[in-house]
Image (spheres, grey):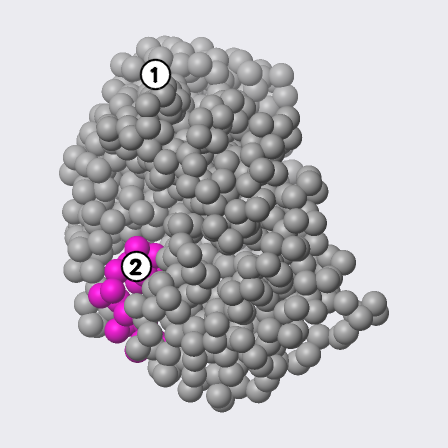
Amino acid sequence: MAALAGLHDIDWSSLDQGSAVPRLLADLAGGEPAALRDLYRLAPDGEDVRPWVVSALPFLLDLVADPARPLRGETLRLVGDLAGADRTWQMAGRTLAAKRLLAEWGGLGDLLVDEDPSVREAAAYTLRAVYRLITNPTGDLWERFAEEPDAGVRLMLLRTSVITGAVGGGYELTKVWLASVADTDDDLRVRISALTELMALYNPVPFDAGRARETLLDAYREGLNREPEQVADMAAPLLTGARMATRQWTPGYHQVVKAVRATYRDDVDAHLGLLHEMLAMDAWDARQDALYEARSLVQRLRGPYRPLIDRAAELLFDRDAQVRAAALHLLQGVGEMARPAADAVWETMSGAKPWTHQGALSPSVGILAGLGDERVLPILERLLDDAPQTTGLHEAIAGYGVRARALGRTLRRLLRTLPAPASPPAPASGSLPASPASASLPYSPASSAPSSRPATPSASPAPRAPAGAVSPASTASPASAADAYRAALLDALIAVVPQEAADYLMQEPLDLTGLHRLIRTGRAAAARAAEIRTALTSEDPVIALTAARAIWCVTGDAEAAATVYDEYLTDPGHAVTAIDGLAELNSRAAGRAPLLNRLVKSRTSDEVRVAAARALWRITGNPSSARRLGPAWEATPRLRPRIARLWVETDMGAYATRYAKAELAIPTRYNLTNLGLSPAEISEDEQLLADCRKLITDKPRWPF
């Protein structure tokens, strides 16, 4: 045959795995599909091609060039795979020789206008192998795209154009061209592919958002993002190239969803409209993408999310495992907002389902523990017996406070099996070790109800923290995993039965972590009062202030604590901590009221003035200082949760209404960052909104 003339002039047996090539080429010329499969099997995957490839390419190209031959499109795709169309970066060795041979052949341009659509599609794919060795391939592809009638060929032309054009000076032009195709093309598959490729490029150009939304939803409905039928029996080694040739694996449309949502900016109704429409589809990929996108929406914008949470609760029972996982992922990241779905999360937990995953609490258990759902307490107790070193287990138990006191016996038993912690080296100066200022006593609007008694954990449950949260007492780095395990057990025991933890604290070093533990233990730690009094004179302000709070919680000595607080009331770095300490003393700090009143009226920082106003309310019961916090609300948004809580406590609705209404009109969360928000931060912002609504709706007690 003319196409195979000179085939036997080559010593194929001297080439690696080349002995079978003449027979396979003859079979391929006769139209045998099995020969195509066997030639694929002789080629390596992702490596430099074998020597027989360079010798066989001229014969394969002759077969493709003959219009009377069968399997021309399939043969041309084989040529593209052998020449590295799926390995455009590979420009060395025999692969480079194959690329050069193909580029010098010069017949690819003619094959782009062949009568057979399969040949035109294969030519558009094969062009990727040689685009670096020829001139202006992208311009020719764009011209051909405009004239091509077959949708499948146009799709391949588009994708190849991105590979050849999105380099160097053609990068921006390629983006503009893709946006134009996405806006104007009549074929749905071409439009969604143009959008997907456009979003994969850096800083995509503007596009028609309305048209893109319709394209996206139609693509989900038509199942264009699904996995097509398996490639024919192209078993290894060039299976990767074969998949790329048929575009079996699509990149997904989640980037398109992000891009469409980006055009909505802060319009939460538009965001929710798109996501709810995706969640209503009978398409698992649309539901999965919507659930993952919903989490970022909740983190950024305020809105009516109850229907979204209810829908996520329903999808916990979806038939597709990936959708169920995405629904759980959403509920895991929205904090208190997931409470309406608690029953559904509980229903998904069966006795056969594991409660841990890769050594940590499973997402379902973590969600319910973070919500303080007492139904999971028996599960936590079982895990404490069977897998006590599970990550997040002890923090989850501590979050329940005294409600988990039944677990105290197990915690004590586990602590008794562990050796005492190694004592840290004593500081050279003989004083307590210094600690960073960031570990100082934090203020918390939810932790300070007026009281005439020291706030000891034994008297009331500790405030519940989200599962996995790190308390101030656990900020120190243990010397070993065993010390970390013991510290987690001890913190959990202090939270659930503080009066029974005193014996385990006797040998604890009195550093910052130890002081925080004594604070939470309260009167049960009275045996260490003398050591705490020594710490009151520490040169480190953080240690001294923490010791002052400890002496109040452990012994009720308000005067000793107030004496330390007085030293730091004018210290810019520690004044807030000192003022908050005075607020805890309530009426026992009445003698400091004039100084606090001057701080409220002074030109000091907003943090100090807000803390002083709150302390005056706790100490004297006079709410008038809360009326001076409007400027601080406007100037320092991060103080708004604290100010709103104080206004609610003092019934300052008449004064605060205009500030609360303005806050409710802001679409973004007050604590929004570029890194997103944690579940606890989402819950904090939702509490701020709840306080603002309360200020507007409640009848004010005090006239303004």
Q: Dot 2 corresponds to which residue?
A: 372
Query: Vertical placement of 554 versus 175: above or below?
Result: below
Q: Nearer the viewer, residue 576 or 413?
A: 576
Q: Residue at x 68, y 63 (%)?
A: 536
Residue at the spot of label 1: 209
Residue type pointed to by label 1: Ala
Q: Tell me if I can see residue 650 in this picture.
A: yes
Residue 286: image x %, image y %? 25, 37
Q: Secondary structure at mark 2?
A: loop
The circle on residue 288 is none
Q: Does 548 sit left or right of 620 as displayed?
A: right
Q: Nearer the viewer, mark 2 or mark 1?
A: 2
Q: Which residues are magenta?
A: 360-384
Secondary structure beneath label 1? helix
Left/right of residue 193 with respect to residue 542 in the rendered view: left
The structure residue drawn at horizontal position 70% and vertical position 49%, both measured from the top left corner, is 567
Q: Residue furthest bottom?
A: 417
The answer to whether 135 appears left or right of 428 in the picture is: left
User: Which secondary structure is most common in the magenta stretch?
Assistant: helix
Q: Quadrant of the N terminus?
A: top left
